[in-house]
Image: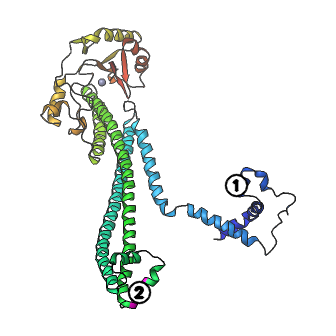
Amino acid sequence: MLSGTSGVMRVAGPVRYIAKPLRSAPVDTVAERPELSRPPPTQERPRMPRAGRRPHAALAVVAGVVIAVVALLPGSRASADTAADQREVKRKRAEVASQIDTLKATDTQLDSALADLQANVRATQAAMADAQADVDAATDRARQAERQAAETQARIDQLRGQVVQAAVDAYVEPKGDQALDMFEERSANDASAKQALIDVTSGAKLDVVDEFRNAKQQLEEQQAEADAARAEAEQRRDALAEKKAGYDTALAQQQQVADQVSARIDDKLAESQALATLDSKLSDQLAREQAALAQKLRAARGSSGGGGGGGGRGSASISVSRPGLSSVGGITVASSIAGQLQSLLNAASAAGYDLGGSGWRDSSGQIALRRQNCGSSDYAVYQMSPEQCSPPTAIPGRSKHEQGLAIDFTIGGHTLRTSDGAYQWMVGNAGSYGFVNLPGEPWHWSVGGG
Ligand SMILES: [Zn+2]
């Protein structure tokens, strides 16, 4: 209150200054013609506040403004707005997460994106539940008001007969319905009609008339309440539809990214298998990382009921065909790329890098692994998402290694690393021979990517 008072005193001067000319000029013209806010020379100029006068009036004006401003701040809605703000933050984070490049992102980034998407799914789900509760509450209120109105109507019907009978008993008018009209209208005749009843009958008859009127008033209120509640329910249903749309979007975003992450897990697991003999340590590391990511993906999909997902990358061909194979420098690849691999190895060698490596990998080992980890059905072996298997296992036939189109290169007995000179040479030259690198796997080069 103290700060409010000091605020009042600070603005008291300007408020009086502007308010004064309003006495001689209409409000709307003041707004359009700013010069009117300056006092004309012929009028008395605004004086400095005299001690003990006028400040009270100014204080009242400002206090009114303060009260009006405070009234505009919806205190009771503050927490609801905060919740809406928090939902909006989650929605935006999910929007960003849904744009993630799942090929280039690190596992940590994917993890974080999945968490953001999941948070948004939960928030939109909760908002939808709240909106549904609002619809239910308004619908309940409408039903209750309708029930009460029906009861009141029944009582009115009953009272109507008693009022008519009272009027007939009073001989106010042989036709009772006309007397009824008289009571229903609060007309000037009211008093004389009442008096007529009092004169002829006991005052008790009047209680019926009052009760009748009160019931009619009550009925109007109950019908108004029912109408208002129905209108509110309708509005709440619109809000619910909006929340439902938000939830659907959140689910779709999550589903889309989850499918991409699943596809990536599939790639990495296949890579882990391809590396099993070449670099068992790297192979184990990849498998562990993907198992952790798969667990998060399963959790995200499971808790939002978004389904387990299919194979992740369209319809899977169930047969895994073995390509025609050739061996180049001890590396087995599809015959279709033997020529370009030979050229690449020759050029690398000329530059001082003797590359070794591992190319084609038989799918039969992968199929056996899937039977063991995923199940024996064709669906389990060839289509089920890798994260649904225990442990997570890549789908057979999808890896470029199984197609003979990828090579994991080694130099000096270890898989190629970004710090190797040979890697730098590959970055500068492999493209000329049609080989591209997979982000995050410096050792893995393929024809056509992936
Ligand atoms: Zn590879």
Q: Quadrant of the N terminus?
A: bottom right
- State which tag comes first along the sequence, 2 or 1: 1
Secondary structure of the magenta portion, mostly? helix
Furthest residue toward right: 42
Q: Residue at x 87, y 58 (%)?
A: 41
- The span from disc 2 to disc 1 (Cα, nearest Å) is 57 Å
Q: Mark 2 points at which residue?
A: 196
Evaluate if marks 2 and 1 touch, with contact meaning CB atoms under 8 Å apart.
no
Location of residue 350 with respect to 394 vertically, above or below:
above
Q: Answer with the quarter of the image where residue 133 lies.
A: bottom left
How crowded is the residue under tag 1: few (<14 C-alpha within 10 Å), some, or many (20+)?
A: few
Question: Is label 2 or label 1 in front?
Answer: 2
Residue 119: in sight, yes or no? no
- Tell me which amino acid carries mark 2: Ala
Location of residue 19 with respect to 244 vertically, above or below:
below
Magenta segment boundaries in residue numbering: 193-199
- Tell me which amino acid carries mark 1: Asp
Q: Is mark 1 on a helix, strand or loop?
A: helix
Along the line of sight, the residue nearer the viewer: 219 or 6: 219
How crowded is the residue under tag 2: few (<14 C-alpha within 10 Å), some, or many (20+)?
A: some
Query: Residue 338: x, y in percent?
Result: 28, 10
Q: In which quarter of the image is the C terminus?
A: top left
Q: Name the residue under label 1.
A: 28
Q: Does the magenta stretch include residue 297?
A: no
Q: Answer with the quarter of the image where residue 321 lies.
A: top left
- How many numbered callouts? 2
Residue 310: in sight, yes or no? yes
Along the line of sight, the residue nearer the viewer: 200 or 77: 200
Q: What element carries label 2?
A: helix
